[in-house]
Image: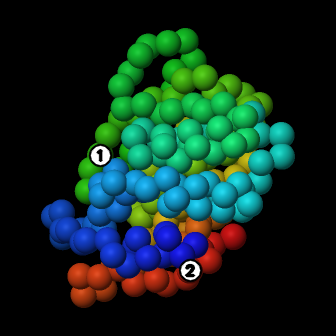
């Protein structure tokens, strides 16, 4: 995880309404995402995630798409993207996403009762996105085989008091305008 660790240590920090936010290729698409970094992350996800009999990878738009696409190409597991646009298709399920800096409606299509899914996301920070997704998947009746986020930002999150165990590749904190590595191996 040398590339991921170094890329986080080099990440600039911006502030949005009092929320300290690191800018990173995995979470923001800037600066440019080098293939070596993405490859390192995908290999680590495949080694860490529970993939037995997983039917679908479920990921929120937009920053989970590149990670999930790369994992899909390596595992032959199809992807379902949770979109910010309603299509009105049969079986579409709405969810309300709240993060540290925004609130949106999102929509899940093509996940059905009994589907065994892997949930992938870029960052676990407030937990608002992952909480909304896991709640919606439970409502649908899908079996969540595993939940993986590449990066976890230190601090409490909305999943702390739930049965959802999120595996992470690296855990960080933002202190005095810098990213600090809290756990280079992540959770799980």
- Whether residue 161 is visible to the viewer of this picture, yes or no, is no
Q: Between 148 and 78, which is closer to the camera in this rendering? A: 78
Residue carrying label 1: 103
Q: How many marks?
A: 2
**Rendered location of residue 6, percent (x, y):** 44, 76
Residue at the image point whose x is 41% and y is 63% from the top? 126
Residue at the image point whose x is 69% and y is 70% from the top? 188
Q: Between 44 and 19, which is closer to the camera in this rendering? A: 44
- Residue extending farthest to the right is 52
**Rendered location of residue 43, percent (x, y):** 66, 58
The image quarter in which residue 125 lies? bottom left
The image quarter in which residue 1 lies? bottom right
**Rendered location of residue 117, percent (x, y):** 69, 40
Residue at the image point whose x is 50% and y is 71% from the top? 3
Q: Determine whether the residue tagged by mark 1 lies in a helix, strand or loop.
A: strand
- Whether residue 18 is visible to the viewer of this picture, yes or no, is yes
Q: Determine whether the residue tagged by mark 2 lies in a helix, strand or loop.
A: loop
Q: Between 138 and 1, which is closer to the camera in this rendering? A: 1
**Rendered location of residue 158, percent (x, y):** 48, 62
Inter-mark Cα distance, 1 to 2:
30 Å
Mark 1 neighbour density, 10 Å: few (under 14) some (14–19) many (20 or more): few
Residue carrying label 2: 184
């Amino acid at each position: 995880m040398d590339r991921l660790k170094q890329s986080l240590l080099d990440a600039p920090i911006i502030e949005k309404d009092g929320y300290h936010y690191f800018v990173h290729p995995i979470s923001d698409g800037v600066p440019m995402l080098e293939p070596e970094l993405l490859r390192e992350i995908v290999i680590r996800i495949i080694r860490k995630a529970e993939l037995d009999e997983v039917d679908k990878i479920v990921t929120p738009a937009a920053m989970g798409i590149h990670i999930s696409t790369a994992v899909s190409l390596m595992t032959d597991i199809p992807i379902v993207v949770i979109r910010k646009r309603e299509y009105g298709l049969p079986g579409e399920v709405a969810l309300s996403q709240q993060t540290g800096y925004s609130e949106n409606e999102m929509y899940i299509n093509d996940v059905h009762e009994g589907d065994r899914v892997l949930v992938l996301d870029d960052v676990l920070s407030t937990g608002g996105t992952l909480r909304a997704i896991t709640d919606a998947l439970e409502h649908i009746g899908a079996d969540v085989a595993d939940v993986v986020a590449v990066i976890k930002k230190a601090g409490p999150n909305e999943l702390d008091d739930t049965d959802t165990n999120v595996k992470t590749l690296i855990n960080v904190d933002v202190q005095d305008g810098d990213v600090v590595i809290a756990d280079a191996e992540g959770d799980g």
